[in-house]
Amino acid sequence: DIKLLALPGVRHEQITNKAVEAVETRFDALYIMDIEERDVDNKVITGSVQDPGVNNTVSAFKDRGLDTSFAAAYFPDVTIRDPFLGVNVQVPPSVAVLGAFALNDTVAHPWFAPAGFTRGALDPNTEGRTVAVNLSRTNLDTVYDSDINPLTSFPGSSGIVVWGQKTLLAAQSSLDRVNVRRLLIEIRRQVKLVGNTILFEPNRESTLAKFSSAVQPILTRIQEQQGLDRFKVVID
């Protein structure tokens, strides 16, 4: 039973495609994807001696033609302080992004955007937090326009910020945003729990009314927490 799927450091196309297929089949979880990185010679990065090439990495990712609202991709890697060993270690973006999602859900709700200085900032008081690639303004636009959410830092501010919340949905839609997909995931999960309690009950008006009366307060609470403007429950 999961809400988020992350496979830190696993970037191979076959495996990440399988992860996308898994969350789409489940329909109740979001995949935080680490993408395959390429260097300036367009070779797949397999070690620390290679420096990521932004354009080559973005171009290779776009060629995959991914189209799903159940996954979100992030770039680049992040260097953080290992509190146990007391040394800096480079980790995949999904490690840092999980922290941002946790922060978002602590100070707000899943239907808020896990990005920006309020809910997408990594702890600036932790030593050693840097990005593997310092993205220029042009780089940021290139990465974001390719449906990859950049991790970056800005002059005058401390720490790393998740600077985007796009899903990998190709068409323009509300579902091309992480917070909208997570809203629907949360609604689906909670309504499913209610549905399980009346499974195998007689298909009568009283059963449907019971189902409806249990779903109504779920959506009312989400509306009060700024997740919905309006809603209507139809069970027939």
Image: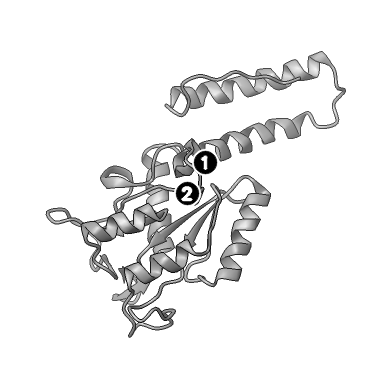
Quadrant of the rendered structure where residue 81 is?
A: bottom left
Tags 2 and 1 touching, CB below 8 Å: yes
Q: Nearer the viewer, residue 205 or 166?
A: 166
Q: Residue at x 85, y 17 (%)?
A: 204
CA gap between label 2 and label 1 equals: 8 Å
In the displayed structure image, the side of residue 4 where residue 202 appears, left or right: right
Residue at position x 50%, y 27% in the image: 222
Q: Residue at x 46, y 44 (%)?
A: 178
Label total for image = 2
As drawn, 123 above or below 7:
above
Is residue 122 at least partly visible in the picture? no
Amino acid type, callout 1: Arg
Q: Nearer the viewer, residue 27 or 61?
A: 61
Label disc, if present, on residue 167 of the rendered structure: 2
Helix, strand or loop at label 2? It is loop
Q: Could you tell whether 69 is left or right of 179 in the image?
A: right
Residue at image x 46%, y 71%? 36
- Give the camera-side residue of 88 and 90: 90
Visual colour scheme: one colour
The circle drawn on residue 181 is: 1
The C terminus lies in quadrant: top right
Picture coordinates of residue 165 (x, y %)? 40, 47
